[in-house]
Amino acid sequence: GESVGLHLPTLSVQEGDNSIINCAYSNSASDYFIWYKQESGKGPQFIIDIRSNMDKRQGQRVTVLLNKTVKHLSLQIAATQPGDSAVYFCAGAGGTSYGKLTFGQGTILTVHP
Amino acid sequence: DAGVIQSPRHEVTEMGQEVTLRCKPISGHDYLFWYRQTMMRGLELLIYFNNNVPIDDSGMPEDRFSAKMPNASFSTLKIQPSEPRDSAVYFCASSFRVNQPQHFGDGTRLSIL
């Protein structure tokens, strides 16, 4: 079945730096991926998504890259701000798990002023 | 627009009691999802509905758990009888279509003593 995991559990950066959060997945049939941000005491908040027919998608200060060859995706945050401090989750769906998102463990991003 | 609304935000009850969690999805969303989040297991999908019909309940841990969606604007997740190991944060999410961004409520923090 779908398995989505993260390489790094924590990431600390200085304000203004760019942040890169990585995620690996195991199911080659996965065709939809999504990144969420979760702040303490709140539910996951949608950041950006990407489908398997794309390898890059940009939003406001965020970019998601998808490498289907090595089953890897990343979230890049430009000019990281203290308000970006949160837990970031990747999730994927597709194949036999159509409609069911499987979440990674999460990466804690801490931004120092 | 109002987001996904969950109630109660916090619930503390004794082992053996019945617990009912409530969710109001975003208007017009056809899909509704129930998740459980713990430190040990992360975010797990319990069940999801399409147009009020349960599609996949393979994540429901035991027969003590049940979920209903009597209409497009309301769903419940019930645990009877509750056990301490059910303590977790329970999230409800909704999406317009499958494999589109799911929007989460702020969850119910459940503690079973």
Image (cartoon, grey):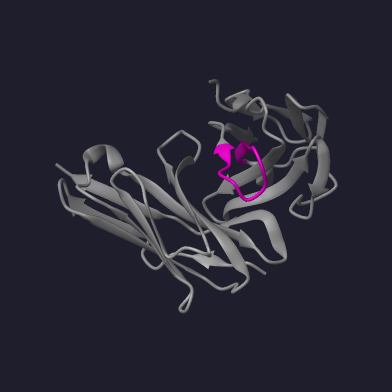
Q: Is residue A101 left or right of residue B63?
A: left
The tally of labels here is 0
Residue situated furthest bottom in the rendering: A69
Q: Is residue B10 above or below residue A4?
A: above
The picture places residue A95, in percent across and down from the top left corner, at: 68, 66
Residue A12 quadrant: bottom left
From the viewer's side, name the closer residue of A41 and B34. B34
Question: Looking at this view, is A86 or B73 the one in front?
Answer: B73
Using the rendered image of the protein, determine whether residue A42 is visible from the camera's viewpoint. Answer: yes
Residue nearer the viewer, A62 or B66: A62
Q: Residue at x 60, y 66 (%)?
A: A30
Q: Quadrant of the C terminus of chain A?
A: top left
Q: Is B91 within the magenta?
A: yes
Q: Is residue B49 left or right of residue A19?
A: right
Q: Is residue B46 magenta?
A: no
Q: Where is residue B74 shown, x and y percent of the image?
A: 74, 25
Residue A78's place in the image compared with B91, above or below, is below
Identify the magenta region: B88-103
Residue at x 35% of width, y 46% of height: A59
Residue at the image point whose x is 57% and y is 46% from the top: B37
Q: Residue furthest front?
A: A53
- Percent across and percent down for residue B8 are 63, 23
Answer with the quarter of the image where residue B53 lies.
Answer: top right
